[in-house]
Amino acid sequence: MRVHLDHNATTPLSVSARAALLEALDRLQGNPSSIHAEGRTARALLDDARERLAAALGVHEDDLVFTSGGTEANNLALSGVLGAAGQGAALVTTPVEHSAVLEPARRLATEGHPLRLVAVDAAGRPDLGEVVAAAAGAALVSVMAANNELGTTVDVAALGAALAERYGRQRPRLHTDAVQALGKVPLRLEGVDLASLSGHKVGAPVGVGVLVRRRGTALRPLVLGGGQEGGLRPGTENVAGAVALAVAVEEAVAGRAAFAERARRHVDNLWTSVQKAVPDVRLLGPPLEDPERLPNTLNLRLPREDGRTLVTRLDLAGLAVSAGSACASGSLEPSHVLLALGLSAEEARAGLRLSTGRATSDGEIAHAVEILSRTLGKAP
Ligand code: PLP
């Protein structure tokens, strides 16, 4: 039996999202922009998906812009707000954001949009007071709701309230990359202008996501074309993907509390077994009892280990995990997130990330524990 403990990278397609996807693909014959019966059927499917998704997220259906995933949603939020605000509009963010925020931020900086990075603490969390202070005169603040590597969460609704209190009508817009938060922690979007979500992290297929964008938040589209998605994301809509996304998000939201409870137990088991095998292992990110963390994510620093080698050994033993570092062109780059915590490049290469999923069973965890106990702390 193989065990997949890399759900922060991607999740398996859920049974109901798959059924909804296949049914929609079978029914779809028309383009939702066409006025004939086939077109109207496609439009009805898309409208229904939008309504269900909006209800599950607690937002207005006109606040949803379907995208190809989290990366595009992040790019649209950053380039869209700064592009609409004009030359010189500044961005405030943190050094532990996903590259789908940091890379557009860096490019925008070269195009005349000053970039202010607010440092994070040892758990990977920015001080909200410092974010608010850094936001003076900025057009956009982007802070992730949950970190994909460390599992650190941030109360973005509290940040929104603090920005409104300090700057009133002059407040900058607030964007959050909520890709990893959805379905794992309660997602509070009051006071948040833009939020990025990705289907394949919650049981929908790869290639569909959404940018929640409050009406009235000016955005310049990334791509130009027809009028789909209010002209903000032109291109014939991925109707079947949107249908599957709506079903997966409904499921993720409804099942969140039960998943969190199970995931916490699983992560506790994994952590206890790793500590037994490697007594000097270190937990990175917030302590497991910190309520401000993802319940399913365990990031470890294993002394004397190279993350990538370890991932390969665990893979051969039947356990799929991640090195907690980005693999670029075959060379293991130390994770920018771990470097931002103050770890050296060598320390940052010794990381291992385990992340459980909604379908992870007690039996799989028991098997993973057995593989970890057997593999960790032993020379290859
Ligand atoms: N943001 C975060 C925090 C992520 O973990 C990911 C996925 O790796 C993304 C954005 C990108 O999402 P997608 O794969 O849908 O483009």
Image (spheres, grey):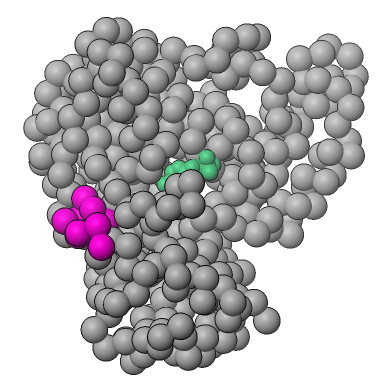
How many callouts does the rendering have? 0
Q: Position of residue 194 (x, y in %)?
A: 39, 30
The correct choice, above or below, for 200 with respect to 322 in the image is above
Question: Which of the 4 quarters of the picture holds residue 13?
Answer: bottom right
| Quarter containing the N terminus | bottom right
Q: Which residues are magenta?
A: 338-346
Q: Residue at x 57, y 86 (%)?
A: 367
Q: Position of residue 342 (x, y in %)?
A: 16, 56
Between 58 and 166, the one nearer to me in the picture: 166
Q: Position of residue 298 (x, y in %)?
A: 38, 69
Question: Which of the 4 quarters of the picture holds residue 190?
Answer: top left
Q: Is residue 341 magenta?
A: yes
Camera sees residue 52:
no
Q: Position of residue 171 (x, y in %)?
A: 20, 22
Q: Residue at x 59, y 45 (%)?
A: 199
In the drawing, does residue 248 fall left or right of residue 117?
right
